């Protein structure tokens, strides 16, 4: 572990301790717990940390999405370089998966998107466009068009919290994109009360029988089960996509029961930590789920 890496891990631990809000008498135990959680739920700032997590998941039979979460002051050219390095890493040996990119961080620079798409074509590893605030959606689809000039292995993300996603679903099937459906982190200002679960299933219905491949990206096992059932009934290739850092156990059990392929999104970089901690703060009960996940993973390792 590099000093930079150690610093990142220490700040992760202390933030988790604060998040758990434990009284001072319990601080040593809180630090031990935070240490375990930060190691198990944060791949780390470097690509090699994400690669180590990817190889652990690979041994369990899961594919990986590698996604770089940049810090605010990073240059777009540096971010693009890391995206290309992630493509190279995924192309080695038996690794399976794709690279997720954040085009606002690249300032929607067509030349940088083109370079990443070229690297995707050369390595044979797909690229996927994460979704961001709704104001970035049109520019993201323009970047997708740039990438499609180099490679057909391109995916987009459709947030269920946006009204426009229904039209974007049609566009995605026409372009032959791999689609990931998420609830979405950002609301649609024109439809703040849109029910994300209901809209999620409407998106599934729009894509079923039409889309190339659909990734059902949610940690909500009830929603995941219904979405996957509808896609399979229509004969649409589908998978369950989970985020490293959110509780996974119920959805992994569902995937095993239904024999659904699983892909785990492994974020790396300094920008990931604020997101991970905001999730923990919003739902402190997640710490308990995480511990249950860890126990299940340990049992898997013992049996494996
Ligand atoms: C692979 C992946 C990629 C993503 N990419 C993007 C992106 O590009 N853009 C974007 O805006 N957002 C993205 N997201 C985030 C997404 O939009 C949501 O914010 C996030 O997934 C939380 O929503 P959820 O549906 O997973 O679970 P939530 O409904 O937020 O629930 C959180 C937790 O509650 C538990 N839970 C929920 N429902 C149930 C239930 N019925 N029974 C038991 N437990 C339950 C689960 O353990 C879950 O971890 C991504 C998420 C994933 C998984």
Image (tube, grey):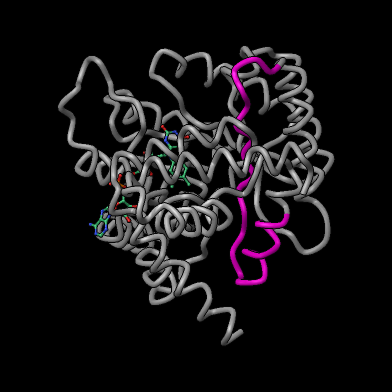
User: Which residue is at 54% across, 51% downward?
Assistant: 38
Q: Over which residues does the magenta segment extend? A: 52-74
User: Which residue is at 50% across, 59% downward?
Assistant: 32
Residue 54 lies in magenta, yes or no? yes
User: Which residue is at 62% across, 54% downward?
Assistant: 64
Residue 300 lies, with reference to residue 118, above or below; the image says: below
Residue 119 locus on image (x, y percent)? 81, 34
Residue 138 locus on image (x, y percent)? 47, 15
Residue 38 lies, with reference to residue 202, above or below; the image says: below
User: Which residue is at 60% across, 72% downward?
Assistant: 60
The residue sitting at the front extreme is 25
The quadrant of the rendering that contains the C terminus is: bottom right
Instruction: Judge from the rendering whether residue 229 lies leftward or rightward of residue 193; answer left or right.
Output: right
Front-lying residue, 112 or 244: 244
Residue 167 locus on image (x, y percent)? 35, 26
Front-lying residue, 136 or 60: 60
Instruction: Judge from the rendering whether residue 192 lies leftward or rightward of residue 96; answer left or right.
Output: left
Q: How many numbered marks appear?
A: 0
The residue sitting at the bottom extreme is 303
Residue 288 locus on image (x, y percent)? 33, 61
- Which quadrant holds residue 206? top left
């Amino acid at each position: 572990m590099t000093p930079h890496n150690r610093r990142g891990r220490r700040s992760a631990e202390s933030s988790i301790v604060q998040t758990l809000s434990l009284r001072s008498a319990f601080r040593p135990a809180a630090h031990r717990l935070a240490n375990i959680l930060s190691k198990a739920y944060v791949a780390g700032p470097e690509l090699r940390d994400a690669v180590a997590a990817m190889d652990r998941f690979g041994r369990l039979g899961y594919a990986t999405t590698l996604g770089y979460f940049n810090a605010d002051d990073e240059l777009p050219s540096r971010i693009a370089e890391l995206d290309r390095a992630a493509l190279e890493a995924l192309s080695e040996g038996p690794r399976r998966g794709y690279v997720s990119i954040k085009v606002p961080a690249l300032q929607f620079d067509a030349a940088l998107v083109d370079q990443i798409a070229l690297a995707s074509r050369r390595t044979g590893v797909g690229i996927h466009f994460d979704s961001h605030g709704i104001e970035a959606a049109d520019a993201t689809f323009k970047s997708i068009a740039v990438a499609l000039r180099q490679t057909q292995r391109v995916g987009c993300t459709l947030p269920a919290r946006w009204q426009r996603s229904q039209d974007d679903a049609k566009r995605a099937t026409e372009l032959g994109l791999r689609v990931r459906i998420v609830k979405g982190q950002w609301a649609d200002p024109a439809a703040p009360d849109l029910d994300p679960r209901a809209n999620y299933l409407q998106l599934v219905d729009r894509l079923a029988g039409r889309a190339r491949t659909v990734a059902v990206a949610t940690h909500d096992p009830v929603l995941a089960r219904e979405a996957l059932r509808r896609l399979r009934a229509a004969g649409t290739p589908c998978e369950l996509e989970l985020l490293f850092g959110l509780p996974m156990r119920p959805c992994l059990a569902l995937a095993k029961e239904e024999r659904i392929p699983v892909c785990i999104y492994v974020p790396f970089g300094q920008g990931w930590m604020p997101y991970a901690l905001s999730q923990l703060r919003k739902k402190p009960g997640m710490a308990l789920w995480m511990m249950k996940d860890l126990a299940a993973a340990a049992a898997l390792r013992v049996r494996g």
